[in-house]
Image: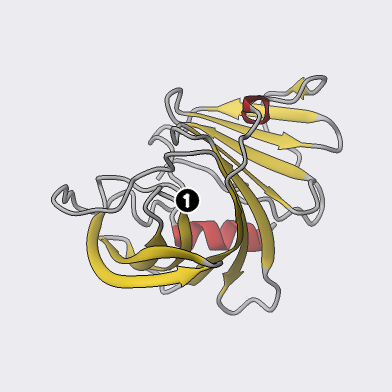
Amino acid sequence: MRNAYAIFAVLGLSSGLFAAARADTALHPPLAPTRDATVNYITQMKGKADSQKVTVSFSRNGDRMRSEPNDGSAAIILDRPAQLVTMVVTKPKIYMQFKPAGGLSSPFLLSLAMHFTPEGDDVVAGTPCHKWAIASDKGHGNACVTDDGIILSEDGVDADGQEGKLVAQKIDYAPIDPAIFQPPAGYEQIRGKMPLPHGNHAVGAAVTHP
């Protein structure tokens, strides 16, 4: 679990690496996916021997995102219009919902609050993308983003010097059932501290406000 906390702190989900970046609306990549997409990623924290395999599903309008480890032990669902986070654990069948005080932040979603500098083109997972340098008062990073708003690769360094990265391995543009962005039927909603499964590396498990 600590590996998940670390990499998402570096890439911006919990520490807000990019959330506090200075505004620059003159030039930027698509800020969110424009079509349904399911992407398999490998994430890696510098200094950690083990990498993590993660599946992320994006709704076609970029409003919702679901991320989960390949073992299916847990999931994080982000609802941007509602500014709502849903944390799901499969054993036991429970979920928790909350609204981060500082708003949602994710390494898989971009924002006009970031400062972007174009750095050419690349191909990741067999898909063309445009490379961008991203600057922030709390760190800096690089991302390669497709024309339809999918981040295919990203790396970042926070103010403390911690480094992390993610790279897409496969992209599927098949339609996605909207139900996956809702709490699963038959799961119990809990309040208070969320009990996470032992060894869980669910992406987004460290979702907090920036």
* Residue at 70% across, 56% down: 201
Q: Is residue 187 above or below residue 61?
A: above
For label 1, the SS is: loop
Task: From the viewer's side, name the closer residue of 96 and 34.
Answer: 34
Q: Is residue 204 above or below residue 54?
A: above
User: Is 23 on the left-hand or right-hand side of 189?
Assistant: left
Quarter holding the N terminus is bottom right
Q: Is residue 122 above or below residue 80?
A: below
* Residue at 76% across, 39% down: 195
Which of the 4 image quarters holds residue 132?
bottom left
Please state which amino acid type lies under the numbered disc 1. Phe
Q: Is residue 183 above or below residue 60?
A: above
User: Is 19 on the left-hand or right-hand side of 44?
Assistant: left
User: Is 130 on the left-hand or right-hand side of 45?
Assistant: left
Q: How is the image coloured?
A: secondary structure
Task: From the viewer's side, name the closer residue of 129 and 99.
Answer: 129
Identify residue for label 1: 108
* Residue at 34% across, 54% down: 18
Other residues around mark 1 within 10 Å, as few (<14) / some (14–19) / many (≥20): many
The percent position of residue 143, horizontal first and vertical second, equals 39, 64
Which of the 4 image quarters holds residue 48?
bottom right
The percent position of residue 67, horizontal first and vertical second, equals 62, 45
Task: From the viewer's side, name the closer residue of 91 and 172.
Answer: 172
The percent position of residue 8, horizontal first and vertical second, equals 53, 57
